[in-house]
Image: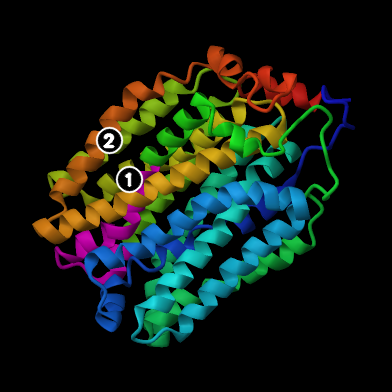
Amino acid sequence: MTAAGTPPRREGGIGFALLIVLVALNLRAFYTSSSPLLESIRNATGLSFQWAAMLTVLPMMTMGPMSLAGVAIGRRFGERAAILLGLATIAASCASRFFVTGDALPLLLSAALAGAGVGLVQALMPAVIKRNCPARMGIAMGLYSAALMGGGGLGAMGSPWVARLAGAWQAGLAAWALPALLALWAWSRSAYAAPVSARVPGARTDAGWLRCFANRRAWLLAVYFGLVNGGYTSLVAWLPHFYAQQGWSAAQGGAMLALMTAAQLVSALLLPALARGRRDLRPWLALTLLAQLAGFAGLLLNAPAAAAIVVVLGFGLGGSFALCMVLALDHLPDPAQAGTLAAFMQAVGFMIAALAPFVTGAVREHTGSFGFAWAYLGAVVVLLLPLSWRFDPRGYARATAGLFGSPTSARAVPLGRAAHAAAE
């Protein structure tokens, strides 16, 4: 029996790992697919740089509130139905892009709707992962993060190829409805979601996200997560265009974004595995931030080794995202409570991250160069380095005490100890 009094659950195996990958691949492909095709989109719709940034901003803005609402939706209708709804929304949003012509409004609406679908899935997947993989939670979360970023790479690299093959940029955006439909089918047949009536004795999650608004640690996690991901959202929006200014083709710019994403994937898999069982994630977070700082400096100086720069950036961005997810889940031993905290972190964090491409796009439009944008993102990383040291694992229990009005929430145990205790 577990500490909460629920029957022991067998650790999720290969089938669960494949399901994680299939679902996560659909959470960024729609988002990165527009960046390599930005020039074609702008020429067809007349979008300015600032409005083109909304293709990146709007999904993040809708991801945020839906990450909060998703917890309540999952509790009301069950994880299975809620994640099915999220995947169906992504598929429908991508498919609708095939019919966009010269009017940018449907394209912007599809971006916002897809972001809402992603937010719903992201709100629930961390709790699903922690419940099904208690002893390997860090590794499973790394796999989820890596697949999420891998989907971003597929979107960046595959969209120009599909657009060229079909002779229409709309096809390059709409093609990502197909993997979303495949994930929808696979999830509908899975047995890993908790039923609607599932409750963990003593674990209060009702209105839990409202309680997070009054908790300083929840806000610290959210702000940290948002600032860390501001670099990613900016690079997704503008990195291919940055290289296009230097005479690169759309396919070449998309390939650089895909290379960055490949480095993110490796880092997201590697760092949580290396950090597994260790009490303190702060040195690992500092490593990822230093990598980001080096990468932004390389962009600012327009260093010639472009491939090396994007690989270093990808390593830093991917590792920090995966470690942030583990960090949030590690604060609380109960999967539902930890999932709610992670949902709050993502909700507020994504809304903060959404501002970064809008700011960097405005800087580019007014200065004609991305230099100040890269300098701004580097300065944010410098601020995050000392902020990382606030996440001392010895303070997890104190920082989350009373968050959900349950004594179990005060027994937060760092990654490794909490996971093995839950598996006993």
The local crowd at label 1, few if under 14, some if 14 to 19, many if 20 or more residues have their Cα within 10 Å, is many
The residue at the point 63 percent across, 64 percent down is 87
Q: In front: 234, or 348?
A: 348
The local crowd at label 2, few if under 14, some if 14 to 19, many if 20 or more residues have their Cα within 10 Å, is some
Percent from the top left, x then y, of residue 212? 57, 33
The residue at the point 60 percent across, 37 percent down is 210
- Left or right side of 6 for 123: left
Of the numbered discs in the image, which one, if any, rests on residue 194?
none
Magenta region's main secondary structure?
Answer: helix
Q: In front: 400, or 370?
A: 400
Q: Are marks 2 and 1 in contact (CB under 8 Å)?
A: yes
Q: Which residue is mark 2?
A: 380
Q: In front: 183, or 227?
A: 227
Q: Which residue is mark 1?
A: 231
Q: Secondary structure at mark 2?
A: helix
Q: Quadrant of the C terminus?
A: top right
- Left or right side of 417 for 230: left
The answer, for residue 139, to whether it is visible in the render is no
Q: Amino acid under label 1?
A: Gly
Q: Amino acid under label 2?
A: Val
Percent from the top left, x then y, of residue 340? 63, 38
Percent from the top left, x then y, of residue 401? 63, 18
Q: Which residues are magenta?
A: 229-254
